[in-house]
Image (tube, grey):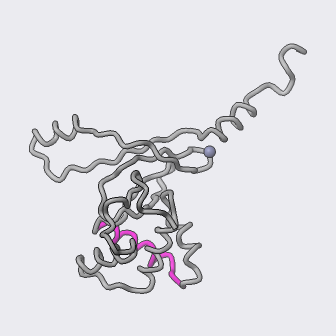
Amino acid sequence: MISATQSNHPLSGVIKPGESPLETACGHLRQARMRITKPRIAIIEALLQREAPVAIEQLHQELQRHQCDLVTVYRCLAAFEDIGIVRRSFQHNGTSLYELTLGAQPKHYHVACKACGRTDRVDYFPVEGPERMLAERGYTQITHIVEFFGLCPACSKKHARNAAPAIPATRL
Ligand SMILES: [Zn+2]
């Protein structure tokens, strides 16, 4: 189980004192007049176990013992995103990833490996410039998505090894 007391954890500061993250999540559902169903609870619990954003298919595999079909997982995550308790990010190939935020503002971005799909955190930085410019142009409720992509250290090493000549150049 993740610890919501970590200061850079997305859930830090959004869990009410004396409440479990699951209770806070259920509070959001009730506020949005969404029923608290077994599949919804199972999905929230599975998301709470994770440090990194997860793809729907992976989440679905973990939820099989709860008999959550893929369509239910899709619908629940879409509804959770609508009410702001999960945040969606993207892999290089466009696959959606989801993480539980319980309405918190982003405290970090992600970098996703283009080869193995591993994700890491990137410290949050403000994008006040573009947001101010848009506000001056009359935009309100401005949000943004920032994603980084690259080869992770392990894949970079593998890539470098594969690119190296099989015979050392000195023997040629
Ligand atoms: Zn990688």
Residue 9, by quadrant, is bottom left
Q: Residue at x 59, y 73 (%)?
A: 61
Residue drawn at (47%, 63%) of the image = 3
Q: Is residue 88 depicted above or below 72 in this figure? A: above
Q: Nearer the viewer, residue 159 or 3?
A: 3
Residue 70, magenta (yes or no): yes
Q: Which residues are magenta?
A: 67-82
| Left or right side of 151 for 86 | left
Counting from the top left corner in percent of width and height, residue 28 is at 28, 74
Farthest residue in the right direction?
A: 171
Magenta: main secondary structure:
helix
- Residue 121 belongs to the span the image colors magenta: no
Reply above or below: 52 against 138.
below
Name the spot of residue 50 as percent of width and height, x first: 51, 63
Q: Position of residue 12 (x, y in %)?
A: 36, 59
Q: Is residue 49 left or right of residue 86?
A: right
